[in-house]
Image (spheres, rainbow, N blue to C red):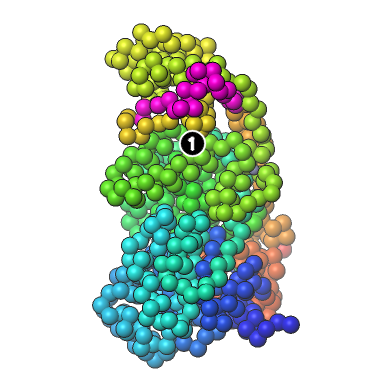
Amino acid sequence: MESVTAALSSELLERHFGYKTFRPQQQEIIEHVLAGNDAVVLMPTGGGKSLCYQIPALALDGLTVVISPLIALMKDQVQALQGNGIPAAFMNSSLGYAEEQAISEQLHKGELKLLYLSPERLFAQNVMDWISGLNVRLFAIDEAHCISSWGHSFRPEYKKLNAIKKRFPNVPVIALTATADRAVRGDIARHLGLKNERMFVSSFDRPNLSLAVLPGVDRWKAIERIMARHAGKCGIIYCGSRDATEKLATKLQKIGVRADHYHAGRSSEERNEVQDEFISGKLHVICATIAFGMGIDKSDVRFVIHYNLPGNVESYYQEIGRAGRDGKPAETILFYSYADVQGQMYHIDKVEDPQYKAILTAKLERMKEFAEAQVCRRTILLSYFSETTAEPCGNCDVCKDPPKYFNGTLTGQKALSAVVRCKEQLSMSVLIDVLKGTRSQEVLENKFDTVKTFGAGGDTSAFAWMMFIQQMIQHGLLEIDYKAHYHLKVTDAGQAVLRGERQVRLVSPDTIKERQERSKKTPVAMAAEPSHASADLLQRLKDLRKVIAKEIAKPAYIVFSDATLIDMAVKKPADVYEFRLVNGVGDHKVKVYADRFLAEISAVRTVPV
Ligand code: ADP
Ligand code: ZN
C-alpha cells in the first residue's frame, strides 16, 4: 500500500508541476528526506534533482534553504518555481538593499517556501543567525561536488558548509550533484558532517546518446558532414576559446546554418537573446564556450560536438548530457588531438597550488584515456562514475567498429629508436619529421638529419605516424614530458620494446580512416517530432510562448518547456480539463495560460488543412 508521504508527494507533483509520475528514485529520495534523514543524491544532469527537494519543501510546514553556487542558476530555478505559483526567492550579491528587505519581510511572515542562497551570502554578516530565527525545515546543497577539492569546480566557501549541520543538527540536509566520482562522493558526506546519510546513485547511462571520437584533423570537413546529417536540427558545438566560437559560427552561417556564438565576453543581453533564440528553435546551432548550457532546459538538442578536448570527464559528460534529453537518439562527437592536450596543459601549468595542479593533471589524463580508448567508450565513461556495465554498449564508435590490430613491433622500434638517437629532445611533430625525413627548421637547427633513423619511416604517411605515436603513448611506451617542451621520453616499457623483449600491438590508421569513412556514410537514426503532432500547431504554440515570455520578461521555458508544448500539440486539448492533462501543466499554469493556449489550438483546429 502506498504510504501517506508517497500519496502526498504524488499529489504535490501533479498539482504544482503537472507531472503524472516520478522519475526513478525521486520518490524514494523525497520520502527519505521527509522522514527527517540526510541524503546524498547523484543524478545525471536533467535527471530531475530539483524536485527531490522542491516537493519536500512544499510538503513541509516551514522554509527550505537551498545553497546554490551560481547566480544565474538560482534565478532560473526561482523563476521556474514562481512560474508554477510556488513562493520562492533568492538572495545573492545581485540584489539591492530594498529587494533584500522585501524578501526578508516575506520570510518573517512565513510566506516563502524556498529560499536560494549563495554560500557567500550564507556566511556573510550574520545570515546564519538570522535564518535560525526562521522555521527552517530542510537544507538542500546543490552542485555539492564544489565541496571537494577533487571536484572539477572546487569552491572554498563550500568547505565551510559543515557549519550548517553544527548549527542545525536536527534539520535534514540533502546534497545533490550531477558530477561526482567515488572520491568526491565520500568527500561530500564527510565535509558536510552528514549523519547516517543515504547515498542515492542514479544510473548515469544515457543509452540514446551515441559516442564517437574523431581525430582532430580536418575538423571543418567533418563538421560540414555532421551539419548535413542534422539539417534543421538543434545542436551545440563546444569550443576551447571565445575566438573559436566566433569563427566557427561565422563559417556555419556562410554555409546556411542558423548559427550564433555564445561566450562570457558577450553582454548579458546578447547572451540571453542567443539563449532564447536557441531554446525557441529560431537558432539551430550554438558555438559556445563552457559558459553555455548551465540550467538550460531544451529537450530536442540532437547533437553536441566538442571542437576541442574538455579538461575532464565530468565536464565532458555534463556537456554531452545536454543532447537528447527527450530520450530520442542524439549524436555526440569529440575531436581529439595532441595540440588540445597541450593547450589544456598550458592552462594547468599556470595554476600555482601544486596539489590542485596535480588533480587537474590527473583529471586531464582520464579524459585523454577516454579519447584514446580502443574499448567501448561507454564502459569507460560509466566506470568513471563507478558504474559497471556487463556488455559493450553497441552505440559508440568502438563498438560499432572494433579495431583490428597488427603486430607493430618493428614500427614501434623505429619510432623509439629515433627518440633515443635524438636524445629525447623531440616533440611529436618533430619526431614525425625525423621519421619521414623532412628537413624542417627544427630538424636542421638540431642536426637531427644526421641521426641514423632519419627518414627510416619515409614509406609511412605523417597521419599514420601520428596515429602510431599516439597509440604508443597510450600503451605507455612513450610519454610526454609536459614540463620540458612536450618532448617525448622512452619509458621502461619502451626500452623493453627496443631490446626486443616486448611486442607492440597497433591499430592500423587505415582501420581508423575506414572507420571514419563508414561513420560518414551511416547517418544516425534521426528522431522526428512526434508524427501525430502537427508541426504547424507546434510552431504556433512556440510563437505564443515567445510572445508571453516577452510580456512577462522571462525566458520562454519558464512559460512551458518544449516537452510540454509537444505534448500539447499531440493532445490538442479542447478545454481546461484536457489542458490540465498535458504533461507539465499544473494548477497555476492552467490559471494563467489555459485561455490563450486553448484559443490558439482551437484556431488551428478550425482551419481546414
Ligand atoms: P537536474 O537538476 O537534475 O539537471 P532538473 O531538476 O532541472 O534536472 O529537471 C530536468 C527537467 O526534467 C525539468 O524540466 C523538470 O521539470 C523535468 N522533470 C523532473 N522530474 C520530472 C518528472 N517526474 N516528470 C516529468 N518531468 C520531470
Ligand atoms: Zn560502446
Q: Residues within 10 Å of mark 1 (few under 14, many from 20)?
A: many
Relative placement, left or right, of 510 versus 181 is: right
Where is residue 202? Give x, y as percent: 60, 62
Q: Is residue 493 left or right of residue 98?
A: right
Instruction: Say which residue appears at 35% left-offset and 13% top-offset.
Output: 448
Identify the element where label 1 is drawn: strand
Q: Residue at x 38, y 51 (%)?
A: 263
Q: Which residue is mark 1?
A: 336
Q: Look at the image and give the residue range highlighted in magenta.
A: 486-509
Quarter in which the N terminus is drawn: bottom right
User: Percent position (x, y) of residue 57?
Assistant: 51, 81
Label 1 amino acid?
A: Tyr
Q: Quadrant of the C terminus?
A: bottom right
Q: Is residue 15 visible?
A: no
Is residue 495 depicted above or below 109 in this figure?
above
Q: Position of residue 441 (x, y in %)?
A: 32, 16
Taking the spot 39% from the left edge, 15% from the top edge, the residue there is 421
Is residue 212 among what the camera can see?
yes
Please provide percent x and percent y for residue 521.
Answer: 66, 33
Q: Tell me where residue 4 sits by quadrant.
A: bottom right
Q: Is residue 495 above or below residue 58?
A: above
